[in-house]
Image (cartoon, helix red, strand yellow):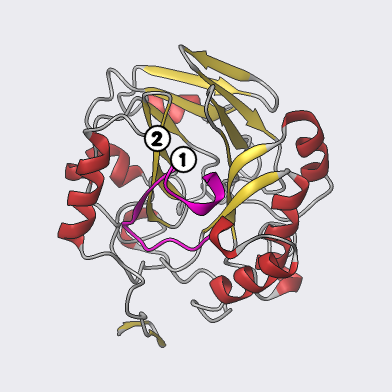
Amino acid sequence: MMKLGTKKVDIPDGHVVPRGEAVRMLADYAEGDRDFLTWVGHACFLIRMGGYTILTDPYLTTYAGPKGVGPRRFVKAGVPVSALPPIDLLVISHNHYDHLDERALAQLPGKERMTVLVPLRLGDFFRERGFANVVELDWHEGHELDGLAVTALPVVHWSRRSGWDTNRTLWAGFAFKTGDHHLFFGGDSAYGPIFEELGEKYGPFDTALLGIGAYAPREMMHASHATPEEAVRMGRELKAARLVGMHWGTVLLTIEPPFEPPARFMLAGTNGGYERDDLWIMRIGETRPLAGDWPSNR
């Protein structure tokens, strides 16, 4: 149990993979050639696709805010920065502190070799911090690597880093496509008709990583974060075969019970026609293969 201000969080058994086990699990996959997915926590994933190692939205340190203030995470990152394999592609959905963690960026090695993909007008933030290869993308623009295509896609959100820069930089979701797998990373998003449009233009997807937390109170959060039920609707409209719930179970940002989202997500998903094996609620620090070993791929 951890006390955050006046709030207490009871962390269920099994929510977090013990750190040593998580590091060993990741190392085993990283040394092989299989595509895999590691949930580091919140919206931070380590993804191996097409031989590339991709890191999304690395919120890895304690506070989702500047200079040691802001919401404090109640579980550590699933794996430490020191245990991450070399990153080929760093992908940032937007500049909110729980997705763009400046202190974590300072700890990342390989700034001279990795490629950084960011929405429009966010590139200078990374160049000023020593990243050599930064690519800004507008919605529907893509970046091609040998065997991997990445496309920035519109989602329903906003951006702000300080009190005077609201929506001066863009926000985005991303599609990652190889010959074997097509994955959607939603960043942060509310539900909107854009998801049906994306499904028609870019779908189907094999896997969609979708936010299922930080949705209450609805009168405040409806324009920026989806409910678990809306996340399932987003997945169906994206024509995604598998849904992975993210953006929950890491830090208290809103007032819903912190472990309510997965139960609602599983119920909505099964009611919406998904098999339970195609609705992933991962443990923080867990690594799973993207293909070959799960019922959805048999």
The one nearer the camera, 98 or 165, is 98
Instruction: Give the residue number, with chain letter if any, for mark 1.
Output: 291
Q: Magenta residues: mostly which secondary structure?
A: loop
Q: Which residues are magenta?
A: 279-298
Q: Is residue 227 visible?
A: no
N-terminal of the two: label 2 or label 1?
A: 2
- Which quarter of the figure has residue 9? bottom left
In the drawing, does residue 16 fall left or right of residue 225? left
Q: Residue at label 2?
A: 35
Q: Are marks 2 and 1 in contact (CB under 8 Å)?
A: yes
Residue 170 located within the stretch drawn in magenta: no
Q: What residue is at 71 percent from the left and 55 percent from the top? A: 190
For the residue labelled by badge 1, is the local secondary structure a helix, a strand or a loop? loop
**SS state under label 2:** loop
**What residue is shown at x 64% (from left), y 45% (from top)?**
166
Given residues 96 and 144, the one toward you in this image is 144
Query: Considering depth in this image, is 279 or 99 the residue closer to the camera?
Result: 279
